[in-house]
Image: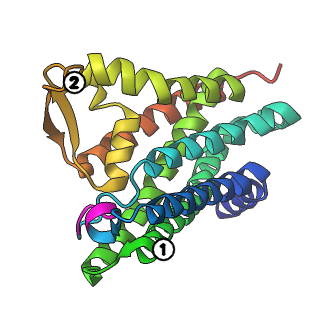
Amino acid sequence: MIRLIRAETKRLASRRIAQLFPLLLSVAIVGVVVIASFVISADDDSDVDFVRDLAGGVEGTGLLGPVAGLITLMAFVIGASFVGADLKSGMLEHLLTWEPRRMRLLGARALALFIVVFFAAMLVSVVTIGALFGLATAVGTTDGTTGELWVNALKAIVRAGVAAGIFSAIGLGITMVLNNSVASIVGFVIYWFIVEPILFGAFLPKIAAYLPNTNAGAFSSGNPVERAEGNVFDGTADFVEVHSWQTAGVILAAWSLVAMLGGGLVFSRRDIA
């Protein structure tokens, strides 16, 4: 089993999408921060306080911000493409000849995926926090930065890696069920941008609090999951805490387990023909 996990890890790590996606996302983040630094420096009345404005206090709950969502998108795409590569090359038919060991193979692949995506997500998180610190150094202040903040930043980096690793299994499982990586990725992008944040977030907030993207973001940042009570369109809605970020991690893991069970069921019953 260890050899199988090692082989699958090397195979995924050698794929271009597993290398380029984290790299391009990191470059994009740095680019946005550089542009922001020029915009802020051009305004004499603007400055940036690293602890207050970017870190969200010494708890560091604001360090990753929207990047946490982009990391989950990256994780899903890498997970889905891991299956898509086999579908495109015809390798899946070869894997299906492993009749007695299909679930063992799928488990090894899921573990390999978790390892690769875990480190890729941590890389993007480190780049993000480093870029934000550089922004505050260039056009603001880093006064008040303490050891406690950096410990919390390290925890956020690890949590982002864990969330991404778990989320990649959702991509793997769903693609196994659909048997089409393009449909899986396109469907998830629509879900990621429209279905969960707009349809559920605005009209069914009680359900949205238990959906995967919401809980992945909360777990990564260390913020509790909140839902709106009242009219969100006229600005009178109040936000109440639903559950902690620890519970969000458990819910995310449950979604991953459901996706993998579905994918495993389809994979175990799939015919070679």
Q: Residues within 10 Å of mark 1 (few under 14, many from 20)?
A: some
Kind of residue at disc 2: Lys
Residue at x-position 37% and y-position 45%: 217
Kind of residue at disc 1: Gly
| Residue 258 visible, this angle | yes
Q: Residues within 10 Å of mark 2 (few under 14, many from 20)?
A: some
In the displayed structure, does residue 55 sit left or right of residue 256?
left
Q: Is residue 106 above or below residue 132?
A: above
Give the label on residue 225, or none.
none
| Residue 8 visible, this angle | no
Q: Which residue is mark 2?
A: 206
Give the label on residue 134, or none.
1
The location of residue 213, given as percent across then percent down, is 41, 37
Read off the magenta span.
52-57
> What's the CA distance linking mark 1 and mark 2?
39 Å
Q: Is residue 61 above or below residue 214?
A: below
The location of residue 18, given as percent across then percent down, is 70, 53
Closer to the camera: disc 1 or disc 2? 1
